[in-house]
Amino acid sequence: MGCAALLWGTILLACSCGPGPPRAGAAPLLAATYVLDDANGLGREFDGIGAVSGGGATSRLLVNYPEPYRSQILDYLFKPNFGASLHILKVEIGGDAQSTDGTEPSHMHYENDENYFRGYEWWLMKEAKKRNPNIKLIGLPWAFPGWIGKGENWPYDYPDITAYYIISWILGAKQYHDLDIDYVGIWNERAFSSKYIKLLRYTLDKHGLEQVRIIASDRLWEPISFVMMIDSELHGVVDVIGAHYPGTKTVQNAILTGKKLWSSEDYSTFNDDVGAGCWARILNQNYVNGNMTSTIAWNLVASYYEELPFGRCGLMTAQEPWSGHYKVESPIWITAHTTQFTQPGWSYLQVDGHLEGGGSFVALTDGLGNLTIIIETMSHNHSKCIRPPLPNFNVMPQRATFYLRGSFYMVETLQVWHSRLDFESGNSSLFQQLHPLQVWEGRFSLDLNVDEVYTLTTLKTGRKCGCPEPPPPQPFPSNYNDDFNIRNPPFSEAPNFADQTGVFEYFVNASDPGDHVFTLRQVVVQRPITWVSDADQTISVIGNFKWVNMTVTCDIYIEKPRDGGVFIAGRVDNGGIYVRHSKGVFFWVFADGTYRVTGDLAGKQILMKGLAGVRDNAWHTLTLNIQYFEGKSLTKNVLG
């Protein structure tokens, strides 16, 4: 019985339309046919797959990795035809404020202060460009230094100042790092100002940055889409409508604008196989359901302490620079199914994209005869993203028959790459090259099981490269010290310190005649325009959250007279967006000569207090010893 005449529809059949017969005794598969044809034009232009470093401090530990492990991690992320082969890197424009897992330093702490070597995002962008010169770069602020708002927690009261601040970052990227920024955003997941967006476009053009495109508003589809429909000037200056965690859906107003639609932040899910299933599903269905031509993952690499919020929500994990250990997680290879066989500038074909038995497919072409088809059959419970809630749906084994028409009719062979997420045995198979698929007279069939990803492509460039195994994991060293004795540090932050409120930077105190020439100094003394509710006290964390017994010793110097102060702490239980509510054991000393031990960062749970004789503008040594006995923490504080 032949099946060549079945072009559309769904039937149950037991005959073979593919290269081989069904397995003996196998139940009949749900079968359906799909046509891929470019004769009547193409769909939207593909803009690439990317990831976010920032929002915030998510790549903090990566910079401290020793070689060769650091370069291996970067290769897995950015090197074409190697691993994730990302097309887009989106970074935070540091604003000195907490933006999820830490603070990222601003290039302008104060109005007359400019430094384009703070932080690590400059370095990361250069490393990405080194591996893929065509990678697109995006900058987006989560927070702003306080001087921009002149005392108000709002960046739009003085839009010219805010625009100047963003333009300075873009110009600095070019002047000091030879980096061309391709896109810039407004304010992550917060309100937008039409007046500011228009002024930003004007200022970009005024400084010869016409090539920099504007994304707005990095929140929801509305109200930005509606406002663009009624404001022609705003419509003219916004190039991309970016939505966060859209659940693969868009809205009619966004489509009617005619603009590019992006999921400009998505995924944000623990990077096990369920996270890989989430990523596989939305990479396809953001276009199939929502016409989105780019999907950008938060975050690039889980390179922050895992106990901070959203631990391991990166495409891969690299959180142990002290050991060199990292792990190439399954989302890396799910990414490769798309990124290694497409490029920005390709076009989607005009297809419905829904598989009859559940799941989806997309087809893309470079317009030069090459064709790539990505198929996913992720089941509901194995592809839940952290947000939004996922409506129920069913996926079943099925046979898909594809008919190639138009310029693809003469395709004779397709390369096949396959992943199977095995949730029963845990024996998943990721990004394996199978035997090429023969196409007979423009037709081929494929038996699809549940929780699989296939890439079928005319390209022969795909590779699954593997570096040597990294060292085994090790806990943070139980004995650790840093004297900050480095005259020309490669980064502004000391290794392994993760700032949670405020910004701590290397500082050379050349006027000190003693042992404190090299220091770590907290440099932000004005509350930033915050993204979340930063703590009222500045704090940087380091080490193992699970430590029970410990001794912390630190030399401290209080610069602010009268009401200045410093603390050291242990067993701190919270950081990131929850840092304000941190509990632990906090040993405070103040410039007025008093000390205090509290059970929380807010200082409300006072365990002991008294006189310490501390004064400002002098060095002191603090020691906090914490021992855990029979359910109680006993502390001993020493002041030297």
Image: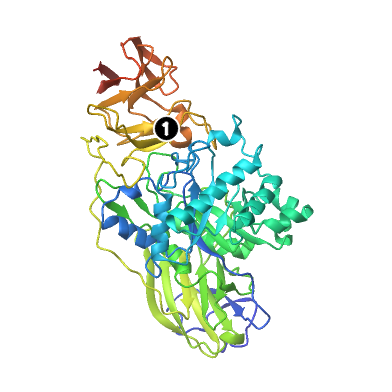
In the rendered view, tell whether residue 21 sits above or below residue 216. Answer: below
Quadrant of the image occupied by residue 443: bottom right
Could you say where residue 280 lies in the image, as x and y percent from the top left? Answer: 49, 61
In the rendered view, tell whether residue 566 sits above or below residue 343. Answer: above
Q: How is the image coloured?
A: rainbow
In the rendered view, tell whether residue 432 sits above or below residue 89. Answer: below
Could you say where residue 348 lies in the image, as x and y percent from the top left? Answer: 59, 72
Q: Secondary structure at mark 1?
A: loop
Residue nearest the observer in this picture, 174 or 591: 174
Residue 529 visible to an observer of this rendering: no
Q: Residue at x 44, y 53 (%)?
A: 176
The quadrant of the rendering that contains the N terminus is bottom right
- The image shows a total of numbered marks equal to 1
620 left or right of 316 in image: left
Q: Residue at x 45, y 37 (%)?
A: 576
The quadrant of the rendering that contains the C terminus is top left
Query: Which amino acid is tagged 1?
Result: Val
Q: Which residue is mark 1?
A: 523
